[in-house]
Every structure is written in C-alpha cells, then in structure tokens.
Image: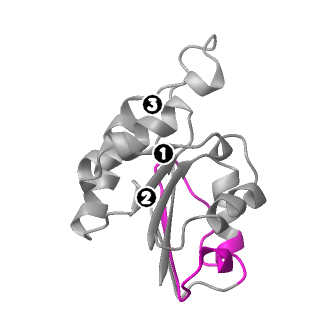
Amino acid sequence: MKTLFLVRHAKSSRDDPSLPDRERPLDDRGKRDAPQMGQRLARRHVKPDLLVSSPALRALTTAHLIADEIGYRRKDIVVDDRLYASSPDGLLTVVRALDNRLDRVMLVGHNPEFSDLAQQLSSETVDMPTGAVAEYNFDTKVWSDIGETEPTKAVLDSPKK
C-alpha cells in the first residue's frame, strides 16, 4: 500500500508586490490554517516517511508548520525545485521516481498543478483550496504505478471544512 498526500500551500500574502513570487510569505490566515491542518493530520496519526516541499517560501513555511504538528523534523524536509512551477505530469514524474521502500509521502506545493494532479488521480477530488490536503491510498507496492491505477481511497480536507 502506498499513500500519497498532496498539500497545497496555505494562504499567501500579496502585500508586497515587489517580492519575487518564490519569496511571498504566508498571510495571517495561512499562518493559522497550516498548523490547524497539521493538527488534523496528527489526530489521524499521519506521519509520512518523506515530506517534500517546493522551494517557494509559502510552501516551505506550510511544510514546516505541518511538520511541527505531526512530529516530522524540519531538517528532514526535502526541498525539490521540481515542485515549483511544474505540471501534473512533472509532479507525477517525481512521484513515480520515489524509493519503493517509502510507503507514505507528502508533497507540498502549488496550484494549478496540485489540483490538476488531484483530478487526474481521482475524480472525487475536484479543487484544492489553499491549505488543502488530499490523501490517496493505492493498492500497490511501487510508486511507478501511481497515475496508472485508481486509488482505493481518496480524501480531501481543507481549512474551511
């Protein structure tokens, strides 16, 4: 069984238009929502074998805040440039190349790519608002099957639920 978590970064600030896109921080709502989503995951005893984040500040901050709540060490978060300004196929390439010894992987990134990939993986997932967490369980032993087989379970949670 493989479990993939797609986490869209929490609400970001656009207060400073001079900041490059990668440097946009979370706004107050995002700083509140990300730990809340982490607490929800912790209550379900979710702890990934690997947490991978986009290098963008808003995504990495979301990853840190969630990691703090689920007991995942910040220093173990892997930053992968391929999660920034990607495509659903690019994200799928990252997933399919994961080490098969890992069973639970969490990716933290951006829309529209995450929503597009979520829809590609399961018709049950429609759109991922900021801070949303989509969880997919696949009855497979290899990550290369992801995207070729339907998940046995697909759940979407978001801060407003």
Please identify, in this view, whether the residue under mark 2 or under mark 3 is nearer the observer.
2
Q: In this view, does 99 lie to the left or right of 48?
A: right
The disc at residue 78 is: 1
Instruction: Say if mark 3 contacts mark 1, CB within 8 Å.
Output: no
Look at the image and tell me in which quarter the C terminus lies: bottom left
Tell me where residue 57 appears, x and y as whole percent.
Answer: 50, 30
Q: Which mark is residue 26?
A: 3
Q: Could you tell me which residue is drawn at 31 percent across and 67 percent down?
A: 46
Q: What residue type is labelled 3?
A: Leu
In the rendered view, tell whether residue 28 sits above or below residue 113.
above
How far apart marks 3 and 1 lie (CA) works out to: 20 Å
Please, what is the three-letter code of the amino acid marked with disc 2? Leu
Q: Distance between the residues labelled 2 and 3?
A: 23 Å
Extent of the magenta region = 120-148
Q: In this view, does 85 lie to the left or right of 110?
A: right
Of the numbered discs 1 and 2, the one sitting upstream in the chain is 2
Q: Position of residue 139 (x, y in %)?
A: 53, 89
Which labelled disc corresponds to residue 50? 2
Q: Is the magenta stretch mostly helix, strand or loop?
A: loop
Q: Are marks 1 and 2 in contact (CB under 8 Å)?
A: yes
Q: Are marks 2 and 3 in contact (CB under 8 Å)?
A: no
- The residue sitting at 60% across, 78% down in the picture is 124
Q: Can residue 63 be seen in this view?
A: yes
Amino acid type, callout 1: Val
Q: Nearer the viewer, residue 97 or 57?
A: 97
